[in-house]
Amino acid sequence: MKLYLDFDPCQECHTLMKELSSPEMLFADEKTRSDGSAKFLRHLTYNHNEVVQAVMEDLPKQKKDQEFDFFK
Ligand SMILES: [Zn+2]
């Protein structure tokens, strides 16, 4: 998990992040991983819009190899 943003993850965030960083997910195939990422991103979009805004503003400043895995 490379999310470094300063925000208050809710209970569901914790669950989703745990899922995403679980060994099952780390060794899962690409589709499963991107599904998991999409799920978390969707949750952020609906529940923590300020985080998405901040990420979007911050992205251009990031080097390409530092972009968030889960936003792919
Ligand atoms: Zn949340």
Image (cartoon, rainbow, N blue to C red):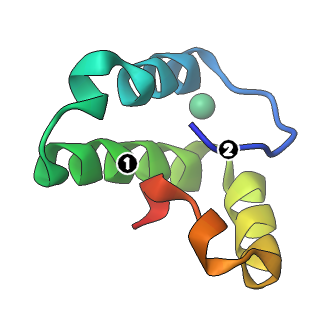
Q: Secondary structure at mark 2?
A: loop
Badge 2 crowding class, 10 Å Cα cut-off, few under 14, some 14 to 19, many 20 or more, is few
Quadrant housing the N terminus: top right
Indicate which disc, 2 or 1, sits on the residue closer to the N terminus.
2
Residue 9 in percent (x, y) is at 70, 26
Vertical position of residue 67 compared to residue 69: above or below: below
- Drawn side of residue 25 relative to residue 49, left or right: left
Residue occupying the point 75% across, 74% down: 62
- For the residues marked 2 and 1, what is the alpha-carbon distance in whole angstroms? 12 Å
| Residue type (three-letter) at the residue carrying disc 1 | Ser
Residue 33 in percent (x, y) is at 25, 45
Residue occupying the point 61% across, 79% down: 64
Quadrant of res 65:
bottom right
Residue 69 in percent (x, y) is at 47, 56
Judged from this view, the residue extending furthest toward the bottom is 60
Quadrant of res 13:
top right
Residue occupying the point 67% across, 61% down: 52
- Drawn side of residue 13 relative to residue 10, left or right: left
Q: Secondary structure at mark 1?
A: helix
For mark 2, what is the residue?
3
| Residue type (three-letter) at the residue carrying disc 2 | Leu
- Drawn side of residue 1 relative to residue 36, left or right: right
Vertical position of residue 17 compared to residue 57: above or below: above
Q: Quadrant of ligand 1?
A: top right
Residue occupying the point 43% across, 26% down: 21
Judged from this view, the residue extending furthest toward the front is 65
For mark 1, what is the residue?
37
> Closer to the camera, 70 or 15?
70
Vertical position of residue 66 compared to residue 2: above or below: below
Residue 35 in percent (x, y) is at 23, 49
